[in-house]
Image: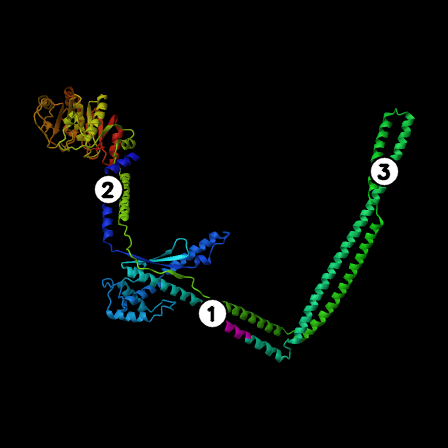
Amino acid sequence: MDFTYLLRILNRRKWIILGAVAFAMLATYWFIGKKPERYKSSVVLSTGIVNYKGINSDNSDAFVQQYQVENAFSNLIEFAMSRSSIKLLSVEMLRHDLGKTPEGAFRQPQTNLSAFSPEEADQLYKLLAQLPLDSLSDPAFSPEIDYALDKIGRAYGYDHDALLRSLSIKRKGATDNLLIEVITESPQLSKFMANAYATRFLTYYQNLALSEKRKTVHALLTQAEEKKIVLDSAQTQYFAYLSNRGLPALGKQSEEVVSQLSELRLSRQRAESKRRAANESVDRIQRYIDDRSSLDAGETRARIAEKSATEENLERVRTLTAKSLETGGKDPEIEGQLADAKRELDKSLRSGARSLGKPRQTDESRRTKEDLYKDKVSYDLERIDAEKSIGDIDREIGLLSGKLSTYVDNDEMATKLAAGVGLAQKELDAVNEQLIEAKLKLEKAENPRKIIENAQLPEWPESDRRVLSSLFAGIVAGAFSVIVILVLAYLDRSLRNPELFKKRFPDTLMLGAVSKIAVKDLDFQAVFEKSKPTPAETAFREGLRKIRAQLLQDESRILLFGSLKPAEGKTFCMHALAWSLAANGKKVLLVDTNFKSPLPEAYTTQASPNAARLNELLRAHALDTVFQIKREKGGGAQEQLVEVLGNTGAPASPSEQFQARDFAALLQDLRQEFDYIFLESAALNQYSDAQELLPYAQGIIWVFNAANAVGDADQEGLEWLAAQTGVRAILTNA
């Protein structure tokens, strides 16, 4: 399905699309015009969410904070739209409309929605008037109140669903504010409802928040009293136990002993630190002394080795010099050894010279070692003193520990009781801290949500946007119509155009397509003779001429016209093609061999110039009872290039009709009189006529209607057609 074909489909259905668009626009415009005017009033609340959760200046947690802000707004809006919050607005509105207020009720009840008696309304008003809305934190009323509230509220339009349709709550842009909008049929009602809802919502939210804090304080007070009772009981048991055994209460004396023990342990820690420091100092000084001794010994050994090497090299040079003198310097080996010995002596002398430049151990070095020995002795004395102090402190700690143990006599039960008293005291202190914090929060509780802009009386009704809505409805209707048409075109299994036919039957030669044309009062001869035909007649005529050009190039002169099913247009196609050939000077005979559907009454048995010869041939072959000459009404008496042999209809098939007759011989004789002979068969899906007429034909022209689908029921006929040779096709209504 190509794009051009889709455009052609839409062009053919353009009036349907335009009609759908116009109807949708007019219907929407009329419907919106019938709706009553609506008035909007709004209240702006500050939430405090952004102020409390502001993003850090360095944007280190921008994403997390932004998510928290959005989540907080979503939670607040969900709470504001909850059934509990809406119920408070229902109560406020019914208290106003059911009460005898000076301004009167905003609405009158619609008893067709919910019927109630005046007594029920008075009873509900009395119950609602007693509700403490300013301090209410739980709008869970009795079932009787809830039932009456819902029943009467539905009649007034103040029930939960109706109020939600009038109420809109959203965040105002990217600000900290919440926008509450109310749209109703009355400007006074919109203003009153918006202010009433904002007031009730803030009061309810504050009461709910304070209620939780009060519950927390009350719970902590109860818990603190319980912990105090537990502490008093533990202390009583502890002191009673000590009193029964004559043990001290660990008063001032035990506190002094414990204090002394703490001081002694601190002194011991200091002495231990001093001892470790002295030990480390002694070890470090000893390493310094050892390193200095090793350095001096190494230096001495190096100097001795250098002196010995120099003396050896000097003696060797003397010996080799004497030998050189003896030989007169003519012995190369001795001269080489002498040169090597001089070089070694030179190296020794240079090394000795460098050693001579280094300072030797002086009296100052010896004094440094003596200072190190003195420091070592000093730190060693400090260590000994620290060890003695540690021993004395340990003995004193032992005495005091023994003295303290005599106070409590190693009583395990007293220890457990004292531990219980301490644990109870800690738990009581923790609860008291939480209680103090909760009381401070309750005292400092402040509702960050405030009304910063009250609802005002709207001056003008809300725009109904009739034109915009109508345009949008037209666009939607047009788009939907286009989609439906394209879907139907996609699901359409008809051949539709020659391109699709060629894709569907690539092995079948297609002669061409016959376009649509009005068949009422159609004169084929006039179509080909008109000098100024209409566009439809031009397309029709040119399509036939293309098919005619291919037939003239072919040698087949007896052609069988067939189709898969009835009403495909093969009769019309035969006659149109015959007149096309006649316009080119060819004589064509149309033989109606479709005995199941003979030619209609529009064809008569009027006289023809060829009638005598045709009747002679029919009688000669005993077929004058099967065929008869027919002409279209108003045909005239001039010589005919297109002749028609019709039949009167018969239940028999062609082979049965021609059983005792020589139809093939008739065709050969007729061939001498006419250039082309066209045979028409019945629908192949229903009858076997095409198969029985095939031996008499020189070629097959199969007619397909572009408006009809080729489905599964046609597969058998298509298989037979594919088995034949020389099959050509014509597409009608293309």
Q: Position of residue 319 (x, y in %)?
A: 90, 32
Sooner in the amino-acid sequence: mark 1 or mark 3: 1
Q: Please tell me whether residue 186 belongs to the stretch shown in magenta.
A: no
- Spatial CA distance of label 1 from label 3 is 100 Å
- Reply above or below: 197 against 466: below
Residue named by callout 2: 18
Under tag 1, what secondary structure? helix
Answer whether labels 2 and 3 touch (C-beta < 8 Å): no
Q: Which mark is residue 217?
A: 1
Answer whether labels 1 and 3 touch (C-beta < 8 Å): no
Under tag 2, what secondary structure? helix
Q: Residues within 10 Å of mark 1 (few under 14, many from 20)?
A: many
Nearest the camera: 172 or 302?
Answer: 172
Residue named by callout 3: 309
Sooner in the amino-acid sequence: mark 1 or mark 2: 2
Q: Position of residue 556 (x, y in %)?
A: 21, 22
Extreme-top residue of the structure: 672
Q: Quadrant of residue 453?
A: bottom left
Q: Quadrant of residue 616?
A: top left
Extreme-front residue of the structure: 459
Q: Quadrant of the C terminus?
A: top left
- Reply above or below: 665 against 158: above
Sooner in the amino-acid sequence: mark 2 or mark 3: 2
Under tag 3, what secondary structure? helix
Q: Which residues are magenta?
A: 221-231
